[in-house]
Structure formats: C-alpha cells, structure tokens
Amino acid sequence: MPTPSPVPDTDAPTPGTVPSLVAGGSAPSPAAPPSVGPSLPGGVVASPPEVTPEVPVQPPAGFLPSTKADTDAGNIPARTWRAAINGGGDGYFAVRHPLPVAQRCHVILYGQSNASGSDAVPVLTTTAVYDALRFSTGVRGGSGGGVTAVSLLESTDDTQGETPCSGVALQWTEDGTVDGAARLILSAVGYGGYGINQLVKGTAPYTDLLSRASHARTLSGGAGVSHAVAAVVWVQGESDGAMAQATYLEKLLDLREDLQADLRNQVPGDGEDFLHLPMVQPSAHINLGGGPALAQLEAAVRSPYHHLVAPAYMLPHANNIHYSALGAQMAGRAAGRALRELAEHGEARTLMPLGASSRGREIIWHWNVPVPPLLLDSSALPPTPSHGFQVEDEDGMVPISSIEVMDDRVRIVVARDLEGDTEVRYALDNNGTGIINGASGNLRDSTADAFWIDGISHLLPRAAPHAKRAVKHLRHDAADVILPGEVPLEEDAFDHWQFGGDSSSLTGLVNSEVLTRAGVLAATYEDSSIILHKDDPGSHLQGLVSTMPDGIEQTILVVLRVPTEVVGGTYQIIAGTADPFTGSGLTCDFAGHVKFSNTLNAFNLPYASAMTGGETGAWICLVFREGAGKFGLLLSGVGNREFHDYTTGTKEPVERNVGIGNCYANYSNCNDADLEFAELVLWNRCLSVRECIDALTRSRQRMAQRGVFF
C-alpha cells in the first residue's frame, strides 16, 4: 500500500490517558480508551480525526504513578508516586532506578545496522503509530533547521526498512493504555558495520546522537511540553566479535556514563543517574569469543542502568546478520516492554543466569525467572542441538545425557565424571538459527506476552541470554557450605555469619564473633541455613544472641524464610532486642506484616501485598537500620524491593545484645514457630540508604551462589 504523508505534530494526548505528570501530585482516574478505528498492519490504529491541544504543565516528578494503595496496612501515608531515594520521607520508595518520564520522552536506537533497519523490508509499520513521534526527515533522519516532529511511521530507504523504533512505541502504548503514558519521540541512529570504538564519545556518530537529542528537546520546548531523554537502546556488538569481554565491558559502561553526563540537562533527577541503556544482545560472530555478548550480560548484572531485553537469536532474521521487519519490530517491542516496566516499577524483569553446582554427574543451574516455570521451547525459539547447552571441564566438552527444567533451574546430567574446573554454557556453541558464526538456544520463561500483525499472533518471549557460569562441585556425603567467592563479605561489619552445615557456622566470618543460644534451643543445620525450632511452651525463647550490644546506631541484615506459622493475636520476633515492651527490632505479626518497632516508633510493612514472592515459605532479605532520628526497613523478595523510612523519634538503647529470633520476650503473645535463617550481618553504625541497598544487592548475589534466592 502507498505510504501516507506524515501527520503533523499536534502534541495531543492519547485519548483515555493522562499526560500531565506533575511533581508530587496524583494522576486523575483514566478514562476508557475510545474507539479510534480499525486495526492496521503492525497492530497500530489510525489517528482520530480530532485532537485536543496539550496543556503545558510543570516538569514531572520523573516517574509514572505507582499502582500502590494510598496507605499501607499500618495506616501510614504511602506515596502514590514513585520517587528517587533521598534518605528521608514518610512513605514507600522505589529502591531501583526508574525511567525518567516527561510529557515527551526521547528514545534513541543506537549502534550498528540493525538499529536502522538494514534489510528489514518490506516495512510493516506504514501507517502512523498513534501518539508517537519522529523527525520530519524520517525515523533515520537527522535534525537541524526546518526539521519538525511528526507522527511516527516507517519508510524504506534503499535497503533499509523497519527499525525497532515502531516496536518500542507500539509496546509502550499497548502496555500503558490505563496509566497516562508519556508521548515518545524516536530516532534510529545506526551505522552499518561500526564497532564500539567508532561509536563512543568523540566520534561523529556520538556527536550525531547528541545533536538529535538536543533538537528533540528544542522541539518539545517549542510545543510547551516537558522533555526527557528516556533511554538509549543499544543494538551493537557483531562487529566486535573478537574483542575481549573485559575490554568491551569497560567501553560499554563508559559509554553510558558519557551519555549521561552529556545529556544531563535532558535527564530529570537532580543529578541522579537515570539514563537507561536497554541492550539487544548480539548473537552473530559468537564463535570469535562472545566477548560483546558476555560483556553485555555482565553489564546487566553490575549496573542498574543496563538491561538485556532480548538475545538476537530469538528474532526472525532476513539473512545471517540482519533482522527481518518482524524481527526489528520484536526487538523494539522487547525494549519497549522493559522501558514500560522501568517507568512503572523501577525495574525491568529479565531472565538472568545465577549460580551452578554439581553433585556427581548432575549439574543444577539456577536462574532468576520473571515468570516461572522455565520452558524448553523449540517452537518460539529456533530448534538448537542440546537446547543450546554445553558443559566443559579440564578434559574438554562433556557429553550431555539429559536436560530438564524446573521452576527456576536447569538440570543437566552428563555422560561421564567431571574433571577439575567445569563450566556450563548456554547459547555459545550450538547454532540453530542460521545466524553467521552464531549460536542459539531454547530456554525461556513462561511470559505469555504477544502482539498481532495482520491477524497473526506473535509471541514476545523472554529468552535466556548468551551466558556461562563456573560450576561449584559439591560433595556426595556432606552438606557443603559455599563461601562467597568473588562476592565480598561485609568486612566493615561488626561480623558476618552464613549459616549451614554444622555449628561452626555460628562463628562469624569477619571477626570470629560467636552466636550463642537463648534458652534451651533446638536447631537443625541445612545446606545453607539453620532452622531454630519451637521451644518448650512457656519459655518462648528461640534465638541466637550476638556479642554486639544494642546501641543508638546499628544496622541488621538478615535473610530468612517468611514464617509459615502465624497464630492469631501473637507475634514472631525475627531480629534485634525486641519484646512487646522494650528494645527494638523486627517482628512478624498475625496479620501478615513485617513490623519494625522500638520504644517510640512502630510501623508495619505488609510483605504479602507489597511484594511478589512474599508468601509464606519464601526467602526474603531484611535490612533494618536505626540511629539518631533515622529508622528504616528495606525488604527484598522475588521480583521486588520496598524501602520504608521513618525519620522522627529517638533511639533508646537497652542493656541487651542484638540477636536473631526471639532472644528475650518471655510472653504469651510471642508465638513460638520454626524460624529459618541463611545469613546475618550486624553493623554497630546506622548505614545510609545507599549502603543498605548495596549491602542487600551483595547479599542477593552471595545467597544465589548457595541456592537461596530472594
């Protein structure tokens, strides 16, 4: 069909949405989306004949409205807007790093030829994507005098066709029809065959990107609307197949920091580093070492601003290196999904590899799974020998006898004994896609996201990235305690305990401080934890006491399972010196809340409703800090984190030592139940919010190596 003329930029809001994101305010209830005409190719709809001019507002707080209730179960006001961590306040804070959002958000596709749609012909999106914008010179077009903003649609320029831009816009709009999404302006800045050294600060492409960002900001100002550079989507790596992982990683991390600094006046956040870099992981030229792909994976682990949105092997290809038009739209949709999650929740959900261990010929590889269970899918993903898995030890590649998946782990049985250092690999060796010198696999989660084109549904899976992990060999005859390895202990702490194996784990790993039992305590040691069992009725003591006195300033980090037994009208004490009348610490109450209390302050954090994975029996991590007028509780579970900060009141120390479990409360309303702990860290100072977040992140990595996931 002929390509229609671009629709002039009117800056009209999408019907049924609320574009005004005012700092500190609440968004009105959105209206139901109206009927705007028949569906068109690419899942887009035609613009309505009439539009309402946009009303200029003050710059936004920087985040989309939270879906959290206005008050928590403790009747303490909770913010209805996600906000940056600032060390204070009286509500809930997102401890992730949300996407900066304004009335107009610029998303730039940057990298090699796949960023600009090489060979992605014929284009799919030939009708304007409603409410999204591009430059009048085209989605690949430059900025400058006379260049305006018009409605987004794709075009064919020689061999260049569909870019990922339309996929970003379509997914953003479809995922956000009920919450007042911002309007996107998109640019494709792709340079065929360019390596990362040709795209970093100081190069012509980098300068081109900055120029387009500046021009988009000028156009937004002229339209009287707030503006932000929301993200730079990185689509690159094939040309650097032989580059070492460490070298590419350093350049990739520096690139985002340089962009952040050079775009500072376009990224809201009062100096916070909110520029995000979603990445499409390259699958071609893996045989040259896989440095870029593995570096991108490492960046996603190390940085809260780098996000793997899709491995290229899951995308339909036009040839052995370029995406087809469908593949380009899928790449964009994967990035758009991540951007929407960042805007609303401060975190993009990604299927990511964790630790691997072996007993005999069995290897278990754990994964962080957004939507369990894991699946081996040879339909939505290209059929690949051994589903993309390989095992290598000191004697070379190890034959695989069987592969099966469970909720969050892959079980691999090999055909011979493992020798020495062993590595398990995914999508680094076997190619089922036809991608040149590439690799693929069949592992994904159970995400059911899909989109429609011309009446055909296409799955948008979360496929596993190219990855490898060292395998830790465990003994057959004993429960091994896996020490942190490359993840550091908290060496600045009073002490640090990791439980499991036997009573030797009651001795601290930093300063050799020993935990002693309160009361007549029965304990069971598991592989990576200790279970403190119910004591005799009437004594109500089931704790482990440290040698650290309760002080004015202190911080406790504890990893435990959510208790499975809660008796109505009673409390289970988790940590600190708390009893019903004095001391401070953490309890779990009969209504399903984690409660932080001291002699002057008390509030509840409802883990069951505030976080995914907070059900009884799930692992959670709590970081509890207290000091002179500073009290806070950071809670983390599968897929979410919440921070509750309370900045009034004073700390009243008691003549007791800090512990875990019920060390002191000998009262009938303190219910006895089995409590299971995996890790404890004590500091005799009040950590900052940033320190609490970093300590929790390290704990998550340490625990994952030991098979404890939260």
Image: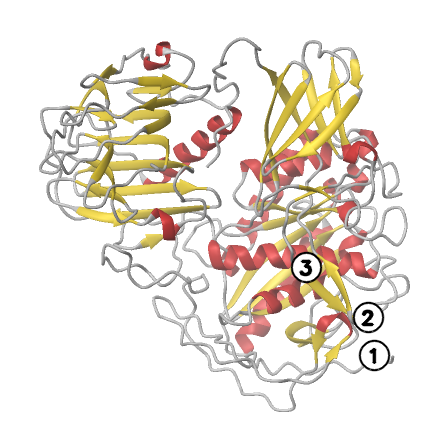
Q: Residue at x 53, y 69 (%)?
A: 181
Q: CA distance from mark 1 to mark 3?
A: 22 Å
Q: Nearer the viewer, residue 305 or 468?
A: 468
Q: CA distance from mark 2 to mark 1?
A: 8 Å
Provide residue 520's location: percent of width, then percent of height: 20, 16
* Local secondary structure at mark 3: helix
Q: Is residue 131 above or below residue 640?
A: below
Left or right of 200 on screen, residue 481: left
Q: Nearer the viewer, residue 411 or 230?
A: 411
- The crowd level at tag 3 (other Cα within 10 Å; few <14, some 14-19, many 20+) is many
Left or right of 628 on screen, residue 496: right
Nearest to viewer (mark 3 / mark 2): 3
Looking at the picture, which amino acid does disc 2 mark?
Answer: Ser
Which label was assigned to residue 155? 2
Which label was assigned to residue 3? 1
Whether residue 251 is visible to the viewer of this picture, yes or no, is no
Q: Earlier in the sequence, mark 1 or mark 3?
A: 1
Q: Residue at x 14, y 30 (%)?
A: 665
* Local secondary structure at mark 1: loop
The reply to whether the C-beta atoms of the residues labelled 2 and 1 are less than 8 Å apart is yes
Q: Earlier in the sequence, mark 3 or mark 2?
A: 2
Provide residue 589's location: percent of width, then percent of height: 24, 44
Question: Dividing the image into 4 quarters, which one contains the N terminus?
Answer: bottom right
Which label was assigned to residue 585? none
Provide residue 691's location: percent of width, then percent of height: 36, 35
Looking at the picture, which amino acid does disc 3 mark?
Answer: Arg
- The crowd level at tag 1 (other Cα within 10 Å; few <14, some 14-19, many 20+) is few
Q: Earlier in the sequence, mark 2 or mark 1?
A: 1
Quarter residue 512 falls in: top left
Residue of label 3: 333
Q: CA distance from mark 3 to mark 2?
A: 18 Å
Q: Residue at x 58, y 80 (%)?
A: 11
